[in-house]
Image (tube, helix red, strand yellow):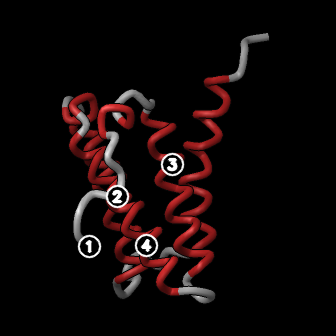
């Protein structure tokens, strides 16, 4: 992969952790869905997801927390293992989708007006 796909790192750093993980999940879900239909589209989505995870690892807010960095790095490791490795962790498309969906739901619920 050459060059940066997502150029607005500053805008990315304004998103919450849940919003960031939710966006990563969108790319990883896209990579999984397209893996059997169009490997080129799947590969591009996979690379975009990895780039977003790398932006998360570089986010100064997350760098202050070893636990956050560990979670982000582990998510990256599991995604790479599933989509490009030997799947040593035994992940499934459903398990990855469920993991990332929880963040998307949390991000969405945090934007809903309080009742």
The answer for how far apart the CA atoms under marks 1 and 2 are is: 9 Å
**Pointer 1: what residue?**
1
Q: Is residue 115 left or right of residue 28?
A: right
Residue 53: % across, % down: 34, 53
Q: Earlier in the sequence, mark 2 or mark 4?
A: 2
Q: Which residue is mark 4?
A: 44
Tell me if 108 is positioned left or right of 39 in this view.
Answer: right
Local crowd size for mark 4, using a 10 Å CA cut-off: few (<14), some (14–19), many (≥20): some
> Residue, x 79% and y 10% (percent of image)?
115
Proximity of marks 1 and 4: CB atoms separated by less than 8 Å: no
CB contact under 8 Å: marks 3 and 1: no
Q: Earlier in the sequence, mark 1 or mark 4?
A: 1
Residue that carries the numbered disc 3 in the rendered image: 23
Q: Secondary structure at mark 4?
A: helix
Q: Nearer the viewer, mark 2 or mark 3?
A: 2
The N terminus lies in quadrant: bottom left
Residue ranking furthest to the right: 115
x and y, in percent, of residue 13 in the image: 34, 32
Residue position for label 2: 5
| Residue at x 58% of width, y 33% of height | 107
Label 4 near label 2: C-beta < 8 Å?
A: no
Q: Residue furthest top?
A: 115
What residue is drawn where x is 51% and y is 48%?
23
Sequence-wise first label, 3 or 1: 1
Mark 3 or mark 4: whose residue is earlier in sequence:
3
Identify the residue at image location x=21%, y=31%: 60
């Amino acid at each position: 992969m050459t060059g940066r796909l997502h150029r607005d790192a500053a805008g990315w750093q304004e998103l919450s952790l849940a919003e960031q993980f939710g966006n990563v999940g969108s790319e990883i879900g896209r990579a999984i869905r397209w893996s059997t239909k169009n490997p080129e589209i799947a590969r591009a989505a996979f690379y975009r997801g990895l780039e977003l995870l790398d932006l998360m690892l570089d986010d100064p807010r997350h760098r202050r927390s070893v636990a956050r960095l560990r979670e982000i790095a582990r998510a990256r490791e599991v995604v790479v293992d599933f989509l490009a490795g030997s799947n040593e962790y035994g992940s499934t498309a459903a398990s990855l989708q469920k993991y990332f969906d929880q963040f998307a739901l949390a991000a969405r619920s945090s934007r809903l007006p309080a009742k």
